């Protein structure tokens, strides 16, 4: 499972909306909403909106994830893969 966060300086986007995209097998989930940087980490200012899709195959979900990532990067969002914390 990979989780991608998109935010940062985006002159086209005045509302400073951030996006989070997560894929688990055949399910793709996106979250979006206002965010700020706190201690070098993105934090939501309010509850985030979300939408999920379930595809017939994991390959279809991967293709849709790639399409959405490409679209966000074209709009000026900065890609920040989330890091896993080790226990």
Image (spheres, rainbow, N blue to C red):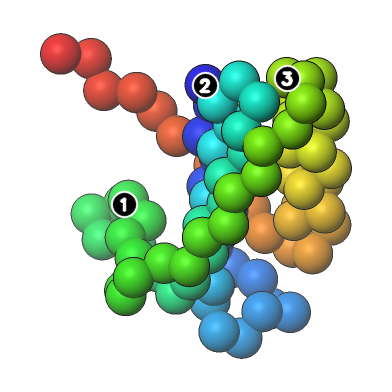
Dot 1 or dot 3: first in sequence order is 1
Residue 1, numbered label: 2
Circles 2 and 3: CB atoms closer than 8 Å: no
Provide residue 10's location: percent of width, then percent of height: 65, 71
Q: Can residue 21 be seen in this view?
A: no
Residue depicted at x 61% and y 20%? 25
Q: Is mark 1 on a helix, strand or loop?
A: loop
Tell which of 36 and 9 is nearer to you: 36
What distance separates the C-alpha of mark 1 from that of mark 2? 23 Å
Q: Name the residue under label 1.
A: 40
2 or 3: mark nearer the eye: 3
**Would residue 13 be found to the left or right of residue 4 on screen?**
right
Provide residue 30's location: percent of width, then percent of height: 57, 51
Dot 1 or dot 2: first in sequence order is 2
Q: Is mark 3 on a helix, strand or loop?
A: helix
Provide residue 54's location: percent of width, then percent of height: 67, 37
1 or 2: mark nearer the eye: 2
Residue depicted at x 34% and y 70%? 47
Q: Mark 3 points at which residue?
A: 58
Q: What element carries label 2?
A: loop
Classify 8 as above or below 1.
below
Seen as rendered, the residue at the extreme bottom is 14
**Would residue 7 be found to the left or right of residue 26 on screen?**
left
Circles 1 and 2: CB atoms closer than 8 Å: no
Circles 1 and 3: CB atoms closer than 8 Å: no
């Amino acid at each position: 499972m990979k989780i991608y966060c998109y935010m940062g300086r985006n002159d086209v986007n005045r509302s400073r909306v951030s996006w989070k995209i997560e894929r688990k097998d055949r399910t793709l989930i996106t979250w979006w909403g206002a965010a700020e940087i706190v201690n070098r980490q993105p934090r939501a200012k309010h509850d985030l909106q979300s939408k999920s899709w379930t595809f017939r195959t994991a390959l279809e979900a991967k293709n849709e994830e790639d399409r959405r990532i490409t679209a966000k990067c074209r709009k000026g969002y900065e890609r920040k893969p989330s890091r896993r914390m080790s226990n």
